[in-house]
Amino acid sequence: MYINLFTMAVKSVNSGMAFFKPLYWLFGKCMEGLLFVFNDRYFLALIVFTVLTRLILFPLNLKQQKTMAKTSRIQPKIQKIQKKYNVSAITDPKQRQKANQAQQEEIQALYAREGHNPMNMGCGPMAFQMIFLMGIIGIIYYPIQYIIGINLPNDTATAIAETLKMDGRYFQISLLQNFDQYKDTLMAEWPKLFTADKVAAIEEYKRHMYLAGIDMTQIPHWKDGIIVIIPILCLVTSIGSTIVSTLIQKKNNPAQAQQQQQMMLMMLMMPLFSFYIAFQVSAAVGFYWIISNLVAIVQQLVTAKFFPPKRNIAREMIENTIQRRSREESIKNTRN
């Protein structure tokens, strides 16, 4: 699912889909503010932006963990119901269907008594992460419009791309990469857009798009030398995040961890996919992914230490007892 969402994000950004433009504008303003605070140090601003987005998502992740704790708490009761009906052992199709329906009804009644909706776990945190990722990719691909603030309607962008013989999807990145070559033409053909102040702003922005001598607007390629460190670090940090998650799960829930170990190959697909994608997008996107993975590792360790699942389960049991007594008291008062 995450892979499909990410692929959609990249395609959407590449095609410049209109309904994402408010998101690009919002993220562009945030980055513009951070660049002002950090004196145009782009990658420091991007690190802070990544940390802030993770902090915003932290309560949502905790809520998801609480829902998982509730699911773990009532899992033995669900298993008891499943054992009672033993649907898999019934050979007659009609009887199996009938038993399965009765089992589902009893499980739903259990959820109702416990005040639990397993669908609440959902893909909320993942979806929000993809929204942030789309915003980040957008402002990296369209910095001239959304960070520097030069308004480029589609017809103007197409005209510039055609005049400079660039790929229309990536022309802002290409323009940034070769700005010294094109700036005279831009100032002559579109003087109202590319004023002296805006040209100076683009040159300053480009100057800060270098990290350790690497032009982070470039798309990594094996033949381009040191820049391949970006996809490699994407792979390493993504694997690291997966391993930390597995180890924490193994400690907190050995039974579920065993299932995760059986799915290890599937879990490693995401790091391998991130490695592949890092060769398809600008190195700056890969840098964001690296920082995001590192922050995720720290976040997982902090969550495991200060918000362990066992504590959540105990808290959930107390809350459930209070709610049940309250419902019983309410029913008693109604009858009286």
Image: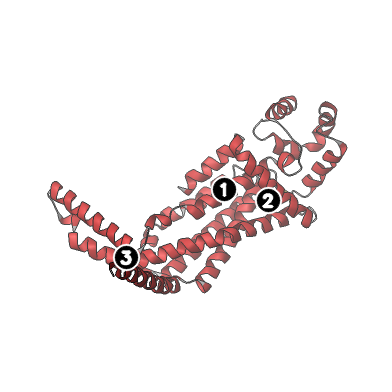
Q: Mark 3 and mark 1 in contact (Cβ < 8 Å)?
A: no
With respect to residue 330, does 154 lie above or below?
above
* Pointer 2 local density, CA inside 10 Å: few below 14, some 14–19, many at least 20: few
Helix or strand or loop: what does disc 1 sit on?
A: helix
Answer with mark 1 or mark 3, whichever residue precedes in sequence. Answer: 3
Answer with mark 3 or mark 2, whichever residue precedes in sequence. Answer: 3
Whether residue 36 is visible to the viewer of this picture, yes or no, is: yes
Camera-side residue of 84 and 89? 84
Answer with mark 1 or mark 2, whichever residue precedes in sequence. Answer: 1
Q: Mark 2 and mark 1 in contact (Cβ < 8 Å)?
A: no
Camera-side residue of 92 and 169? 92
- The residue at which mark 2 appears reads as 226
Q: CA distance from mark 3 to mark 2?
A: 50 Å
Question: Residue 189 at what x, y percent from top left?
Answer: 82, 26
Question: Residue 256 at what x, y percent from top left?
Answer: 37, 64
- The residue at which mark 3 appears reads as 75
- The residue at which mark 1 appears reads as 131
272 left or right of 252 in image: right
Identity, as a three-letter code, of the amino acid under mark 1: Ile
Identity, as a three-letter code, of the amino acid under mark 2: Ile
* Pointer 1 local density, CA inside 10 Å: few below 14, some 14–19, many at least 20: some
Camera-side residue of 312 and 110? 110
* The C terminus, quarter of image: bottom left
Residue at (64, 59) in percent of width and height: 52
